């Protein structure tokens, strides 16, 4: 390979368990250092596992394309189901559509490509939080903090990164820092309060007298 081109097999990219371990992410964009568009892959080892987490793209305004590379998936799009065997391409123009996909066969893999129509591409902030999850299994919570802090340096005061940083700091025992960052996140995203009240990462932080009620 040269600096002008690169190639990689998806199964050469170590998957990272994300979204509470219910999803395996292969960080394709990061691996190839793609800067023009977002592209990642997800794999479900077993039938019944998530291969696209339930979410919308309201925060980022992204259009998304999902390509089922192998296996078979069932997509749920705003409550409607779509059978998607290998070779199926699903395009979601509206960022507000709630999306989710479940693997129907072992080894189902989905490629996801996204970006905001009419805008220059920016790396999505969630990538730093997803990448930090690889340190969770090893119990290296300080490394989680460092990884998310890198993203926050590029996107100061981003509520998603602030929240995820607070969770990592809580796991690392930095409870006062965790409280400060989660509080700042909730000031911007009040709708996340229920999530914060039930997040197991924040169990010790919720005991602090300054926890936002």
Image (tube, helix red, strand yellow):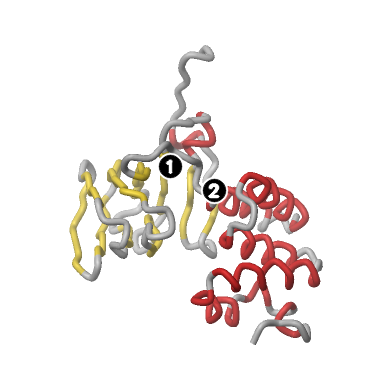
Distance Cα–Cα, label 2 vs label 1 = 10 Å
For this view, does 149 lie left or right of residue 57? right
Residue at left 53%, top 57%?
18
In this rendered view, identify the residue nearer to me: 92 or 88. 92
In this rendered view, identify the residue nearer to me: 212 or 43. 212
For this view, does 141 lie left or right of residue 63? right
Are there few (<14), some (14-19), or many (20+) residues within 10 Å of tag 1?
Answer: some
Instruction: Look at the picture and state if 141 lies above or below 188.
Output: above
Instruction: Look at the picture and state if 194 lies above or below 11.
Output: below
SS at circle 1: strand
The x, y position of residue 89, in whole percent, is: 22, 44
The x, y position of residue 79, in whole percent, is: 23, 70
What mark, if any, has residue 127 been given in the picture?
Answer: 2
Residue at left 52%, top 74%?
192
The x, y position of residue 155, in whole percent, is: 60, 49
In this rendered view, identify the residue nearer to me: 169 or 75. 169
Residue at left 23%, top 44%?
86
What mark, if any, has residue 40 been given in the picture?
Answer: 1
For this view, does 131 lie left or right of residue 205? left
Are there few (<14), some (14-19), or many (20+) residues within 10 Å of tag 2?
Answer: some
Pick the quarter of the image with the C terminus. Answer: bottom right
């Amino acid at each position: 390979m040269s600096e002008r081109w690169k190639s990689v097999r998806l199964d050469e990219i170590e998957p990272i368990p994300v979204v509470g371990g219910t999803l395996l992410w292969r960080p394709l964009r990061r691996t190839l250092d793609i800067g023009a568009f977002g592209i990642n892959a997800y794999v479900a080892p077993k039938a019944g596992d998530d291969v696209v987490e339930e979410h919308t793209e309201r925060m980022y305004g992204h259009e998304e394309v999902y390509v089922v590379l192998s296996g078979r998936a069932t997509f749920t799009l705003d409550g409607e189901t779509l059978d998607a065997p290998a070779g199926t391409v699903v395009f979601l123009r509206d960022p507000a559509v709630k999306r989710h996909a479940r693997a129907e066969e072992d080894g189902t893999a989905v490629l996801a490509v996204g970006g905001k129509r009419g805008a220059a591409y920016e790396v999505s902030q969630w990538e730093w939080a997803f990448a930090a999850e690889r340190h969770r299994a090893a119990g290296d919570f300080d490394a989680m903090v460092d990884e998310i802090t890198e993203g926050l340096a590029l996107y100061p005061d981003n509520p998603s990164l602030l929240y995820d940083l607070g969770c990592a700091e809580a796991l690392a025992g930095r409870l006062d820092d965790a409280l400060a960052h989660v509080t700042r996140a909730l000031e911007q995203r009040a709708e996340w309060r229920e999530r914060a009240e039930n997040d197991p990462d924040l169990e010790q932080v919720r005991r602090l007298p300054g926890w936002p009620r």
